[in-house]
Amino acid sequence: MKATDNDSYPGNESNCNSDNKISQVLFPMLYTVLFFVGIVMNGLAMCVFFQISSKSNFIIFLKNTVISDILMILTFPFKILSDAKLAPWALRGFVCRVTQVIFYFTMYISILFLGLITIDRYQKAARPFKTSSTNSLLGTKILSTVIWIFMFTLALPNMILTNKKPMHETVKKCALLKSDFGLVWHEIVNYICQFIFWVNFMIIVVCYILITKELYKSYKRTRCKGKVSRKAVNMKVFIIIAVFFICFVPFHFTRIPYTLSQTRDVFQCSAQNILFYIKESTLWLTSLNACLDPFIYFFLCKSFRKSLLNMLHKRTQEHANGDSSDETPL
């Protein structure tokens, strides 16, 4: 929901420009790869989830995550066309007002649900035989709805308050399209989003410390019986923290010095450009989350894995039967 991440804030030196080849060629190509891979993987994941009932908190969280990922992926073509300058300059105004806000809106929804998924996996590790009750499922659905409403409430003013008329020069910096209160709201939302990230960062770290302890206890209890396979399966749970640290941690550590470089005159132009490329690279990693989440579904959700394999097996059989029916007897 940071509408000015790709641009300088008002008041920054306008003659400090980044390398056009990297900004207009490399990053659009990288996002193009993510778009095609992500739309296929998440489209398939959505088809699978349509066949699975919401019988546990875990599945409800995963369904919300795949919806968030698809919304994020649908913003990529606008970013690609805008950054590569393959579309009219007026498209940049739409990117600043709508799609870039949706991108950050969905990013923090994904972060929130990764935190909830981690808590659920810790509870599963601590009490492996406990099942979700009807009241628990209802509470989880209400919580998921509240998250979407809360994040949308934060995002909507960023769209409404980016209300200045787009012009060829002003669309180069999204902040120039914001009203005075829009800039203030944008800063407030940035602080809230930082808070959301760091709270979920602490939740995930603490939960994985506890999960590691539970796995070690389980290993100590079973090693004498030779049940190593159970331990190996449980180790898959660490895919969540791996995805979180790969996708979200680098960007949020980079965001602080990058914001300083854009809001205060404390960095030379060369340093600003270096921070810009680091920020864009780590922002691409946050987008990579949309392609990595399906691995979480596959490795950690037995219902998803079973439904996916059944669907692929059914399609393979139908294709084979279709080929057989097309054969003409001699």
Image (spheres, rainbow, N blue to C red):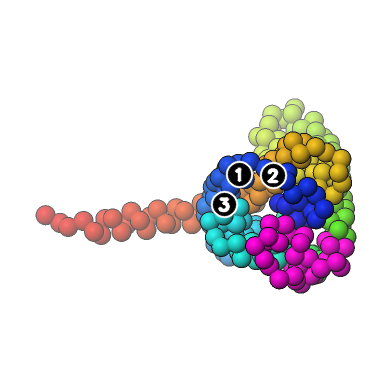
Q: Secondary structure at mark 3?
A: loop
Q: Is residue 25 above or below residue 158?
A: above
Circle 1 Cα neighbour tier, 10 Å, few/some/many (<14 / 14–19 / ≥20) = few
For the point 40% across and 53% down, the residue is 316
x and y percentages locating residue 81 in the rendered image: 56, 56
Residue matched to label 1: 20
Number of numbered callouts drawn: 3
Q: Secondary structure at mark 1?
A: helix
Using the numbered discs, state the Cα–Cα distance from disc 1 to disc 3 in whole angstroms: 9 Å
Per the rendered image, the range of residues in magenta is 157-186
Q: Is residue 309 left or right of residue 11?
A: left
For the point 72% across and 52% down, the residue is 7
Residue matched to label 3: 84
Kindly identify the amino acid type of the residue bearing the numbered disc 2. Answer: Asn
For the point 87% across and 40% down, the residue is 266
Q: Is residue 221 above or below residue 7?
A: above
Task: Say which of 189 and 244 sits in front.
Answer: 189
For the point 79% across and 54% down, the residue is 9
- Is the stretch drawn in magenta largely helix, strand or loop? helix
